[in-house]
Amino acid sequence: MAEQSEIDELFRQTLHGDYEDEEEEGGPWEAISKLQAIGSREVLEKAIVWARDRRPARRQRGIDILAQLGRSEEHPQTAFADEIYPVVTAVLADEQDLEVIDSCLVALGHLANPAAIPLILHYRRHNDPDVRFAAAFGLSSFANHPDAIAPLIELTRDADPDIRDWATFGLGVQGNADSPEIRKALLDRLDDGNPDTREEAVAGLGKRHELRVLPDLIELLQQDEVSYGVVEAACHLLEMEQVREDWTAEEYIQALTQRYSAELDRYS
């Protein structure tokens, strides 16, 4: 168990370094991650105190720590979630600092309480793109919930490419819901100027066995670098249970072409 002095030092470290650089050695996010890994009630209580601090930086770090407290591959749910959720919503209710709002919206996504959906929706049209991105992130955690689907579709058309990308990922890849509206939203993103957004759309359409994606899927399989999501889309359309590590992209193209020659003629 971590000593209180170690916990206190890690809390101090969260305030030093480049907050935007999540990979910085000895930076804020390294300390945040270590505190989350400790995941003890001592960390919980101190993070709650910080989340209620008058100083925005401390409020933000407190919320960041709480968002994924105690989470790991073995324990994918945030520890003390029932205690943390009302803390985050109370901070968000009166918050004016945009960076703290960002962290609250992201935290609500991690906490995965559907009661947060109306709170997140309030920010989906905010004039600050970082806030809208955080809203897209938060809503993506509820991509199968009927109240989140239409707002995510709306965010796939956002002016900001990063927001479109994340909303498309949430709607198409994280979510399993299917409807003509969802498919249209994903099909619309096949012409997106952001390559990442286009790849997320292909992955989402492949997951839904939407054959209109075939020309774009084959085009992406012909690129020098092929993403895992694109390969997964091919596997879905070929009804393969898992990715074939021994297959090249060309072999996927050949299999798709053989199986769907008529559909390729129709949609090309």
Image (cartoon, rainbow, N blue to C red):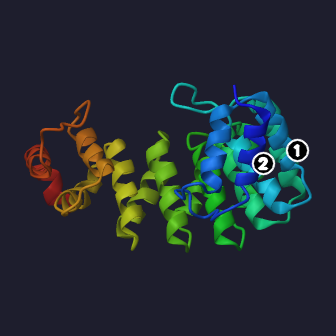
- Give the residue drawn at x 69%, y 72%: 128
Q: Are dots 2 and 1 in contact, CB under 8 Å?
A: yes
The reply, left or right, for residue 129 in relation to residue 92 is left
Circle 1 Cα neighbour tier, 10 Å, few/some/many (<14 / 14–19 / ≥20): some
Q: Which quadrant of the structure image shows residue 19?
A: bottom right
> Does the rendering let one see residue 10?
yes
Location of residue 52 in the rendering, given as x and y in whole percent from the top left corner: 89, 49
Location of residue 50 in the rendering, given as x and y in whole percent from the top left corner: 85, 48
- Give the residue drawn at x 90%, y 57%: 94
Pick the residue in front: 267 or 238: 238
Circle 2 sits on which residue?
62
Pick the residue in front: 264 or 199: 199
Quarter of the N terminus within the rendering: top right
- Amino acid at pointer 2: Gly
- Amino acid at pointer 1: Val
Q: In this rendering, is residue 115 above or below 157?
A: above
Location of residue 93 in the rendering, given as x and y in whole percent from the top left corner: 87, 53
Specify which label sits upstream in the sequence, 2 or 1: 1
> Does the rendering let one see residue 117?
no
Location of residue 194 in the rendering, given as x and y in whole percent from the top left corner: 40, 70
- Give the residue drawn at x 73%, y 41%: 66
Q: Which quadrant of the structure image shows residue 218?
A: bottom left
Residue 36 circle label: none
Q: Which quadrant of the structure image shows residue 212?
A: bottom left
Q: In this rendering, is residue 65 above or below 39?
A: below
Circle 1 sits on which residue?
49
